[in-house]
Amino acid sequence: MSVLVNRVHFFFMIITNNLLSSLLETRAHTEEICAPLQTEDYVVQPIVDVSPPKWHLGHTTWFFEEFILTKYKTNYKRFHSDFAFVFNSYYESMGKRVIRTDRGNLSRPTVSEVYEYRDYVTNNLQGLLEEIDDEKIQSLVEIGIHHEKQHQELLLTDIKFILGNNPLLPKYNDTFSENPTQKFAVEYIKINEGLYDIGYQGDYFCYDNELGVHKVFLQDYCISNKLVTNKEYLEFINDKGYENSLLWHAEAWDWIRSNHIKTPLYWHQIDGMYQEYTLRGLKKLNPDTPVTHISYYEAFAFAQWKGMRLPTEFEWEAAQSYFDWGTRWEWTESAYLPYPNYTKAPGALGEYNGKFMVNQKVLRGGSVATPNNHTRPTYRNFFHPQLRWQFNGLRLVKDK
């Protein structure tokens, strides 16, 4: 019996060490993302969808404190009594919170206090993991790690929006590469009609919205091996695509007219030439780069202009092994809905995905801002159709 106990303890020690290493690496990387910022950059909130970097740092810390430390660490003392109110995001069942539009008004707590908060919570988490072998705690820490990785991506795109809407267009750094080139020819990959398994079937981490493995019948279709490029999208613009009401949904047409949308986000026409704001600063538009920072509305209109369409998320998943993906989140034609037999997690964690399954479109694939190894072929991202501050692009489908 003692040999069995020792083996079980050794097994849990391996899991704990791996989890702890992943936790510390993730926490450190979040702070590395913020390293190029000046203090003034940490508190800016240009629009409701973009949160200040300081808030991201606090919120990803609050998640660990609120869901783990306050419940499982004996005699745990909160770092600050007001931080649960300041850094809660949308968890109604977890109590009151700062209104989302007011995150930019948080001149206090200071940036240095937020970093102290992060150190305090990380150290307590490390102590908890070293003290207790508990699968539930380990599972919650793993969810917290993936939650923070999602915010690492949001940090990069929010920082880009903050700096990209500064009249001086300052660069973030000289190293972040966001514009890979596609110099290969377009081919349309034939996918035969039939039943396809959809949903996550592995043994590792996934989100609950990937579960409920089920079969979907797909008709014959052909999907592009290549994302739509800046060159192709410029042809759409030059052909007055933004002025042709026949290409747009009625809601989208109202949106582009009300907001004076004429190009993807971050495009600037200077001396008759298009340039694009990037995290490296303002750069000449590269025609071979996949177009990005477009809404679902724009992706749909472009597909209409080409006489094609966007893939459904099921068509994308069934075909994804035949092309490279991961540089742009790819808009699909699918509404964000639960899979058959989907079950929300109990308690507050059930608010993580299920409550958003209305009025949103699914995106697949990941982007240049997505942390390494964070996406899967079954990963389902989702946004409202007008949003475009993420690295969103499109891939075309034709039926014949």
Image: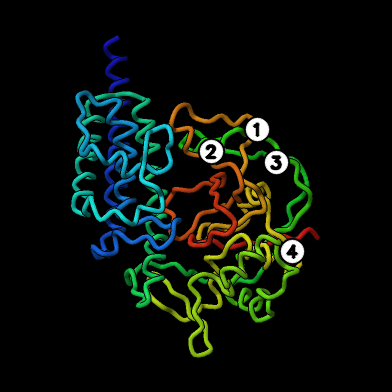
Which numbered dot is residue 145? none
User: Callout 2: helix, strand or loop?
Assistant: helix
Q: Residue at x 26, y 30 (%)?
A: 129
User: Callout 3: helix, strand or loop?
Assistant: strand
User: Can you name the residue that lies furthest to the bottom here?
Assistant: 271
Which quarter shows the N terminus?
A: top left
Which numbered dot is residue 308? 4
Q: Residue 183: in sight, yes or no?
A: no
Instruction: Judge the density around disc 2: few (<14), some (14-19), many (≥20) Cα neighbours within 10 Å.
Output: few
Asked if residue 310 lies left or right of residue 267, the reply is: right
Asked if residue 102 lies left or right of residue 75, the reply is: right
Q: How far apart are marks 3 and 2 (CA)?
A: 27 Å
Q: Which of marks 3 and 2 is nearer the N terminus?
A: 3
Which numbered dot is residue 340? 1
Which residue bears the numbered disc 2? 355
Q: Residue at x 66, y 46 (%)?
A: 314
Q: How far apart are marks 1 and 4 (CA)?
A: 29 Å
Q: Earlier in the sequence, mark 1 or mark 4?
A: 4
